């Protein structure tokens, strides 16, 4: 199974999660998300046509290190 092109990485101590996208074999940083809204804005800015739906599409987005939609402060 191929790796999804968008990764929401494990939370930092602040709860923020790095969001990256794989383009042409390279991981590009989209930003640090503190909420799903931030992820949606990053994906929209990257040109994704339906970023809200993408958040729960496993073939597009991989959530690492914590459950999807969680931004826990440690």
Image (cartoon, grey):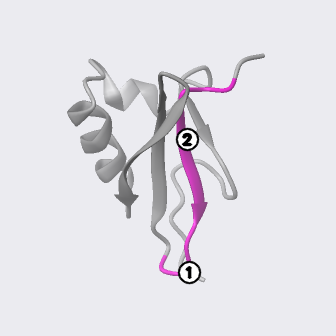
- 29 or 6, nearer to the observer: 29
Which comes sooner in the sequence, label 1 or label 2? 2
Residue 13 occupies which quadrant of the picture?
bottom right
The circle drawn on residue 13 is 1
Instruction: Find disc 2 in the rendering and name its residue.
Output: 7
Are dots 1 and 2 in contact, CB under 8 Å? no
Residue at the image point whose x is 70% and y is 57% from the top: 65
Residue at the image point whose x is 30% and y is 22% from the top: 48
- 56 or 13, nearer to the observer: 13
Cα–Cα span, label 1 and label 2? 18 Å
Secondary structure under badge 2? strand
- In the picture, which quadrant includes the C terminus? bottom right
Dot 1, how many residues are within 10 Å of its Cα: few (below 14), some (14-19), or many (20+)?
Answer: few
Dot 2, how many residues are within 10 Å of its Cα: few (below 14), some (14-19), or many (20+)?
Answer: many
**Residue 61 percent across, percent down from the top left:** 55, 32
Instruction: Answer above or below: position of 45 versus 54.
Output: below
- 69 or 43, nearer to the observer: 43
Start-end of magenta stretch: 3-14
Instruction: Answer above or below: position of 52 versus 39.
Output: above
């Amino acid at each position: 199974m191929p790796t999804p092109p968008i990764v929401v990485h494990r939370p930092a101590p602040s709860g923020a999660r790095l969001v990256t996208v794989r383009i042409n074999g390279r991981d590009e940083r989209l930003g640090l998300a503190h909420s799903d809204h931030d992820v949606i804005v990053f994906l929209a800015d990257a040109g994704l046509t339906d970023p809200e739906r993408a958040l729960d599409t496993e073939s597009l987005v991989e959530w690492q290190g914590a459950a999807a939609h969680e931004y826990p402060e440690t």
